[in-house]
Amino acid sequence: MEQSYADIILPLAIKGRLTYSIPSNLLSLARPGVRALVQLGNRKLYSGIIARIYNNPPGLSKIRPVVDITDPVPVVNERQLKLWRWMSEYYMCSEGEVMKAAVPGILFPEGNTSAPVIEKYKPREESFVQLTKKFNDEELNIILDKLKKAPGQSALLTSYLHLSAFGTATDAGPVRKSVLLKDAGSSAANLTGLIKKGILECISLEVGRLADSRNVTVPLNKLSDSQSAVLDSVHKSFAEKDIVLLHGITSSGKTEIYIHLIEEQLKSGKQILYLLPEIALTTQIILRLQKHFGHLTGVYHSRFSDQEKVEIWKRVADNNPSGGYRLILGVRSSVFLPFSELGLVIIDEEHDGSYKQHDPAPRYHARDTAIMLAGFHGAKTIMGSASPSVESYYNALSGKYGLAELKERFGAVKLPSIVLANTREAYRKKLMVSHFTPELLNAIDEALEKEEQVILFRNRRGFSPYIECPECGWILVCNQCAVNMTYHKSARSMVCHYCGNSTAVPSKCGNCGSPGLATRGFGTEKVEDEIKIVFPAARVARMDQDTTKGKNSFKSIIRAFEERRTDILIGTQMISKGLDFENLTVVGILNADNLLNFPDFRAHERSFQLMEQVSGRAGRRQKQGKVIIQTSDPQNKIIRLMLRHDYYGMYKIQAEEREAFNYPPFCRMIRINLKHKDRAMLNNFAGNLGDDLKQLFGNRVLGPEYPVISQVQLYYIKTILLKIEKHRPLSRAKDMIRESIERIEKLKGSGGLKISVDVDPY
Ligand code: ADP
Ligand code: ZN
Ligand code: ZN
């Protein structure tokens, strides 16, 4: 018999796949996507994934056999393997690194001698109640009539009919026994009675460990005329194009459009991936989706335990609509789930920077990856935003994507009015109360008076970005990074936001020894403190990385605000995105300058998007909202555009600038990061690589340079940026870059050097 070979991906940062032979006793189990146990090095066993099987002997001297195959069925499907391969090529990393990011860790214990078999995972069974047969209305009326003498049983049955949505389109399905008994406030004896009478029966069903929604679903909202028109135009675009950009102002009903598209896909038996940039957002949207699509809807993000992740994997892979998920709502890592028949990908807030993973590899952009994934499934993609990214809008204008536009808010609610508050002037006139202008304070006063709610946005967490000695100017910096340490008041510590390192708050200057260090600048924690002083009667909460560490912390902060137990919510980016609060009328942006002056070619685009998005939270129902933007530069052109909600104006200016200075979407960027603990060695290697690349790419190479943060965790950093014209073959350029890097990595003394590549690093 012919010998078979397998190329295997291991969850390690090694280049390429490894080849093993398949012993004949394992041949029947071997297929792409199953896990195989193999030996690497001397003794260590690793669990990897078989990517390819073939008979042509590879020209290798020594080929070891596969030790074992642990799955009767593939853990990942062929389209996932295809996606991994694409990612590793496009984002210049190994397939193993993609695999590590993609698959729940417990499936691939590193260096273990044995991997857990996926069957070892025990689904939990639970008791459900259902009707013994399909009774019609008349039969049920007779039954209920007869039960008049047994009111307990009658109440229980009525409760069942209600919970199971009897008589609706979704029809009477099984209801969880515990839920039913609780809802009816009934004893198990009543249930036994109904079972004895042959009306109800008990069955055992596999359920997730995850909280399940009740199976009650409600029909979709009717679309407004303008929404219907947009849905039609999306359909028309899909007839010709695979990707449509939905440009709709905040609260125009983009989510409603998605929901209608989802229903169509579900009806035709397809799966849907719905991407959001932030975990906090899933909390509200999931309720909206479950209301319509019940148990078909699942959520996926990094806060789940590995056990829970495996369960979600199984339910996504499960093609049986009674147990499987057909609609997944998730953040960027959801692109890795084992979809088998994706029909639609929705990318909400497509412009959002959180879709890009910067570290570790794969340094991928979830929007662009999801578009590829959709392509592999022959699925359509809709991406939505109130202020699309310049590159997506460019693609829409050039005809590569379809474009649909929603220009009015649902229910003809007006966009919020925007007030500029000049901080420089207020400081000069001594009208500032801590960090608040009179305009903002008045607006908050008014809102509180009317029992309406307020959100204050500040893109910086902690209390003060740094502390300084007023005598000599000394600042406490992280001993591992070239970064000021942030003062966290409630934690009573100084924290480095780059490496997480924390130390005690110094009581005196580290240079001249004088006491009385001053806090400088302000973060969300300080805003919270000060707001409480200015508005002592208001109930104040804060949402940022520090207050949302617990698994359910997002949920409880958001719920408290929804239920009006909070008057003023202070937060970072987290509160800026798609949240929908009925009673929120005032939004304050505490320091717009800070956004606008960020040293990045996208700073203006990002500021506009962020301000537009935060403002979009205000006045989403009957009342018109009010947004106060505090700035020392009210004439700034981005702020002027923002005043008029002029997205197109912003786009035009940005597109012109990018074309003139050669930035995406008019070129592609690849950034190479070099790190070394020894500064001189780093300079040497970076210079060497830079020279090499300049030979190949000429003036397309910028740097090497120290980035703004030039040292993190004891490593000095230098970057080299390549700008490559759109029409040049990118894969050829990548090959050349790879070769140059490999050459540098072979140089003497390069052991301490770390090189990483970031494709589309923005
Ligand atoms: P967007 O996603 O564009 O911000 P949403 O879809 O969240 O807008 O809509 C804003 C608000 O208006 C939501 O509370 C939503 O429930 C409501 N809404 C939008 N369209 C409709 C509709 N056709 N029927 C009922 N309510 C709607
Ligand atoms: Zn640090
Ligand atoms: Zn000092």
Image (cartoon, helix red, strand yellow):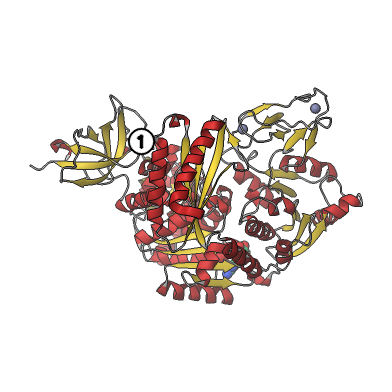
Point out residue 319 in the picture as x, y percentages from the top left corner.
33, 54
Q: How dense is the environment of label 1, judged by Cα within 10 Å: few (below 14), some, or many (20 and up)?
A: many
Give ligand 2's quarter of the image. top right
Q: Decide if residue 731 is on the left or right side of residue 604.
A: left
Residue lying furthest left? 1
- Residue 532 found in image quarter: top right
Which residue has dot 1 on it? 108
**Cβ of disc 1 within 8 Å of ligand 2?**
no
Camera-side residue: 433 or 691?
691
Task: Tell me the amino acid under the disc marked 1.
Answer: Phe
**Where 105 falls versus 634 (above or below)?**
above
The residue shown at (64%, 38%) is 546
Residue 268 quadrant = bottom left
State the residue at coordinates (77%, 41%). Answer: 521
Circle 1 SS class: loop
Q: Is residue 401 left or right of residue 628?
A: left
**Residue 24 falls left or right of residue 710:** left
In the rendered image, the quadrant that contains the N terminus is top left
Q: Is residue 719 above or below residue 349?
A: above
Give the image location of residue 434, x and y in percent: 84, 44
Residue found at the far right of this picture? 429
Asked whether residue 323 is in view, the answer is: no
- The quadrant in which residue 464 appears is top right
Q: Nearer the viewer, residue 679 or 568?
A: 679
- Position above or below: 696 against 233: above
Farthest residue to the top: give it. 513
- Please state the horizontal and vertical placement of residue 650, each as a whole percent of the image: 65, 66
